[in-house]
Amino acid sequence: MSGGANISKPSVEQGRGRPLIAIVAGEASADLHGANLVKAIRQIQPDASFVGLGGPRMAAQGVKTLVPASETAVVGLSEVGRKIGNIAKAYFTLSRTLKQFRPSLLILIDFPEFNLRMAAKAKKWSIPVMYYIGPQVWAWRSGRVKKIASLVDRIVCILPFEVEFYRQRGISVDYVGHPILDAIPAEIRPEDMRGQLGLADSHPVVGVAPGSRDQEIHNLLPIMLRAMEGLSKRYRGLSCLLPLAPTIDEKKVKPLVEDFRVPLKICHQSIYEVFSCCDCAMVASGTATLEAAAMEVPMVVAYKVSPLSFFLAKRVVKVDHICLVNLVAGYEVVPELIQDEVTPELLEKHLITMLEDSVARDKMVQALREVKEKLGKGGASRRAAEIAMTIIESRAGKAG
């Protein structure tokens, strides 16, 4: 892991000309949103420089990643202990960077426990803070709202129901829509993708999205593959597509797949291209559920963590649904299987309904369209970038 001493300080006056922006994205989905945000900021301010914690997508956009996101990403509360050493190193590395270079802005993306501590450091050194995709305080530990109000200059939301929650508590908030809409390729032809993947038009295709972290893959993929074994006996010619998340090493997935007799293709195309071919899907709870919704793919959602993480989560989570699709809709659009409910039999049962009950399928697809409409019309990253530059310009004006 790189240290803060290797950073080259921009040869400009802080807050003028070429701004230095620190950005912290400790999870796979945050890396994607961070990369899109960095790209959008560069379109406004081409000579901006970036440093922080992120994954391969942010690095590809030119962010100097002092800490790779793979070293800090965790699933569930109990898994934090396994990476506490990496998380502590990341905290001290980034703290030194903030103190030494006093960036024009600190952008935080999700990852609340870590990021609120980074916000406190930024506050200490008079660095403005924009929280992009803020903590889900509406779901658990709502007492953090006071801390957020004291540490964060602006919250930028990507979920429509969050805005009123923050406004009612006196926090400056903007809703920009969801950035996944910008990631969908302009033209996806399902028939072309099926041909590219060697799929027959007349046979059912099921998507398998077990998550973007190693622990999620470990918890969910074997159960999903067992469900596919059952389905493949029922449907002749069935195909199964697994869009591989950029954060997952294919070498770790293949041994799991080899244990099952499943017609599975591991795909390196985007999740949107893969979902365009699918009649239905099994999806790990998280951003991928909204990506499936954006492609109008009927799905069953699975959430499974360690017993300790689940025990802890049950005592703090205060929402009726764990799936983002259902939270945006305000009711259950797609079935959720949680912890011990995640079984091959139940997954298979829901998939059969989606494949065979056209009325239920059409109803779900219509509800998914409505969810997609609630996520906005695209341009979220650009709007978030404009807010970031407004904060930087405001600070420069005060300094001048």
Image (cartoon, grey):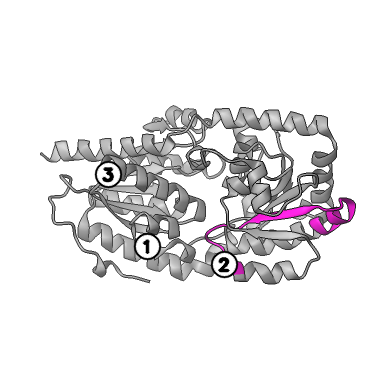
In space, the residues marked 2 and 3 are separated at their CA atoms by 36 Å
Q: Visible in this render: residue 237?
A: yes
Left or right of residue 380: residue 218: right
* The stretch drawn in magenta includes residue 238: yes
Q: What element carries label 3?
A: loop
Q: Which callout, 1 or 2, points at the residue further toward the start of the chain? A: 1
| Amino acid on which the number 1 mark rests in the picture | Tyr
Image point (67%, 43%), residue name: 191
Q: Is mark 2 on a helix, strand or loop?
A: loop
Residue 297: image tag: none
Image vertical order of residue 172 relative to residue 109, above or below: above
Q: Position of residue 334 (x, y in %)?
A: 71, 38
| Amino acid on which the number 3 mark rests in the picture | Pro
Left or right of residue 52: residue 289: right
Image point (68%, 61%), residue name: 219
> Which stretch did the figure color magenta?
228-250
Label 3 sits on residue = 128
In space, the residues marked 1 and 2 are separated at their CA atoms by 25 Å
Q: Which callout, 1 or 3, points at the residue further toward the start of the chain? A: 1
Residue 91: image tag: 1
- Graded by Cα atoms within 10 Å as few (under 14), some (14 to 19) or many (20 or more), the crowding at tag 3 reads many
Q: Which callout, 2 or 3, points at the residue further toward the start of the chain? A: 3
Image point (65%, 61%), residue name: 217
Q: Where is residue 322 in the image (x, y as percent from the top left)?
A: 64, 43
For the residue pair 108 and 21, the one nearer the viewer reads as: 21
| Amino acid on which the number 2 mark rests in the picture | Asp
In the image, which is nearer the foreground, mark 1 or mark 2?
Answer: 2
For the residue pair 173 and 25, the one nearer the viewer reads as: 25
For the residue pair 382 and 79, the one nearer the viewer reads as: 382
